[in-house]
Image (spheres, rainbow, N blue to C red):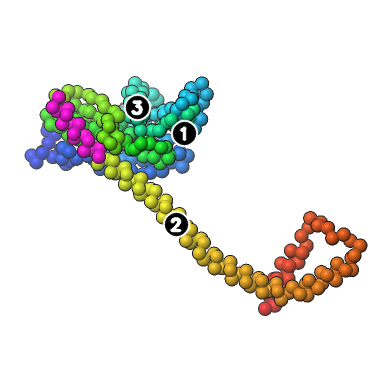
Amino acid sequence: MSKPEKFFDDEGLRLDGRRVDEIRPMKIEVGVLSRADGSCYLEWGNNKVLAGVFGPRELHPRRMQRPDTAIVRYRYSMAAFSVEDRIRPGPNRRATEISKVSREAFEPVVLTHLYPGAVIDVFAEVLQADAGTRTAAINAATIALADAGIPMKGLVSACAVGKVDGKLVLDLGKDEDNYGDADLPVAMTQDGDVTLIQMDGNLTQDEFKEAMELVKVGCKQILEIQREALKDKFSQFDNEEIEEETVVEAPESEVEVEETIEAEVVMTEEAESEIGDEVEEDDENDDEPDEYTGDEPDENTDDEDVEEGETNE
Ligand code: UDP
């Protein structure tokens, strides 16, 4: 891919038609992995990221445990097929760095002190990369943590801001990232506290301040999308529960009542002669002790009698 001739059209719109303060479309699916405690699939422009959370669970080997807190491990990795030129699978310098700063982005929000000796593992797998994958992974990981029920002070939202052709732009696209003048990925809590900030390139102090204001707007928009995704997941869960209760309980209890009444009537009709027979039998075998034998002949007899009674009706 070569450098585009220009990054903005005559109306000031970017290569993909966005305004300078507009983020790429984001789609979030919650709870997509059945073996993870929490998970999320996130698409952001052409980025596709899958996040899975496992834990809190006991950390092994035990000597790695912290007696006062849980530890959070975060592994960011890119699939070999996620980029134009296949990348070598396995850890590399870039992935190790991104994993470290991303873990630290969650440190201020995850209530790790509630799980001493435990570990919470976060895996972020980039399936398709198109600039901004570390921020996409953080956004997915937040949702996966929430889906796993990990107590947090709030959600973390992440977005990059950068400079292209001398203009500040929110959420860099691939060409803007490759050929731009600066790239500033940021993660922040819902209260606006910055938990990750990195910078590639150069910005003046004024540009930096302006960039931070712009990225705040981006993170707020993302926070709303994250909240909506979680609301959708959990309100759907509530509705399902309510529906299940209604469907199962109401009609069944009516049927049960009718059947019980029918059975009682039949039993009552048969009961007198049956009881009479039993008493006579007992009288005949006076030598035999009235002990429980382990068999249940009486119940079987009753069942047969009930069926007979029903057929006769
Ligand atoms: N990229 C790539 N090969 C690599 C690493 C990155 O093609 O080995 C691409 C990928 O599309 C990525 C973009 O370069 O999204 C920008 O990478 P950067 O290191 O800035 O991280 P990101 O913006 O994805 O967080």
Q: Residues within 10 Å of mark 1 (few under 14, many from 20)?
A: many
Q: What span is in magenta? A: 205-220
Dividing the picture into quadrants, the one containing residue 11 is top left
- Mark 1: amino acid: Pro
- Does the magenta segment cover residue 207? yes
Main secondary structure type of the part rendered in magenta:
helix
- Which label was assigned to residue 242? 2
Is 284 placed left or right of 108 in the picture? right
Q: Position of residue 201 (x, y in %)?
A: 19, 23
- Mark 3: amino acid: Glu
- Residue at the image position 13 percent from the left and 40 percent from the top: 13
- Which label was assigned to residue 56? 1
- Mark 2: amino acid: Ile
- Does the magenta segment cover residue 40? no
- Residue at the image position 35 percent from the left and 49 percent from the top: 232
Camera-nearest residue between 90 and 29: 29
Q: Position of residue 197 (x, y in %)?
A: 26, 27
Secondary structure category for the residue under label 1:
strand
Q: Does the image show residue 34?
A: yes
- Residue at the image position 55 percent from the left and 65 percent from the top: 253
